Image (cartoon, rainbow, N blue to C red):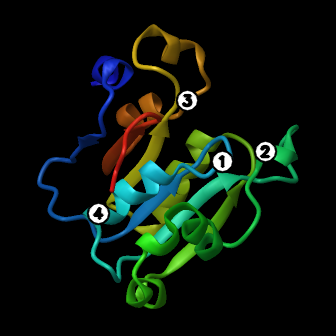
Amino acid sequence: MTRVARQIGVPLLAAKAGCEAPTRCVIALPDGQIHAPTIRAAFRLLSSDAPVWIAMPDRFATPHPELIAAGTARELVLEALGDAMASDERDRRLLERVDIAGDMLSGVLRLADEAGADLIAVPNRGAPGQVRVFLPNVAEPLLVAAPCSVLIVPDAVAIP
């Protein structure tokens, strides 16, 4: 599965055995930058009242705090989706931002466990192929370590 994730240029959903429609989601943004395709793809899989946690690195614990997006989860989602997010969805969806100190992979897995998430969505940075091997990326390790379904969304994909 990790080889597929490295080569693929479209979103990849690795569904846990017996998985139904996901009801609780963690969206991991490990580089602290908003990734609109990942947020859009995750929202497409979730009902409009499904709770979503957005996991980002702790801007106070990272050596590059200027890279970490500012704002609450709702502000980050509105920035990513803009008018594409219906007003009733804005009001009903529970959105929470969680800043992860330390190792992002461990933090995202811990958050998913604590939140009871059945889906983790994460961007897959870089061009398909061997380039991804050299980029810091938690997408591939999540495929191996996550106890729930994982949605991986590459950079150059358009999700309406």
Q: Are marks 1 and 2 in contact (CB under 8 Å)?
A: yes
Task: Tell me the amino acid under the disc marked 4.
Answer: Arg
The disc labelled 1 sits on which kind of residue? Gln
Residue closer to the observer: 11 or 133: 11
Relative to 26, residue 139 above or below? above
The residue pinned by badge 4 equals 44
Q: Are marks 1 and 4 in contact (CB under 8 Å)?
A: no
- 4 or 3: mark nearer the eye: 4
The residue shown at (40%, 12%) is 129
Taking the spot 70% from the left edge, 59% from the top edge, the residue there is 99
Sequence-first tag of 2 and 4: 4
For numbered disc 2, what is the local secondary structure?
A: helix
User: Which label sits on residue 33?
Assistant: 1
Q: Which residue is disc 2 drawn over?
A: 67
Q: With respect to residue 68, does 139 lie above or below?
A: above
Residue 14: percent from left, percent from top: 25, 41
Q: Which of 18 and 4 is in front in this view?
A: 4
Label 4 residue SS: helix
> Which amino acid does the dot numbered 2 rest on?
Leu
Label 2 or label 3, whichever comes before in sequence order? 2
CB under 8 Å between discs 2 and 3: no
Q: How far apart are marks 4 and 3 (CA)?
A: 23 Å
Q: Which of marks 1 and 2 is nearer the N terminus?
A: 1
Q: 131 or 118: which is nearer to us?
A: 131
Q: In this view, does 11 lie to the left or right of 120?
A: left
Image point 88% across, 53% down: which residue? 60
Q: 123 or 110: nearer the eye? A: 123
Residue beneath disc 3:
137
Alpha-carbon span between mark 2 and mark 4: 27 Å
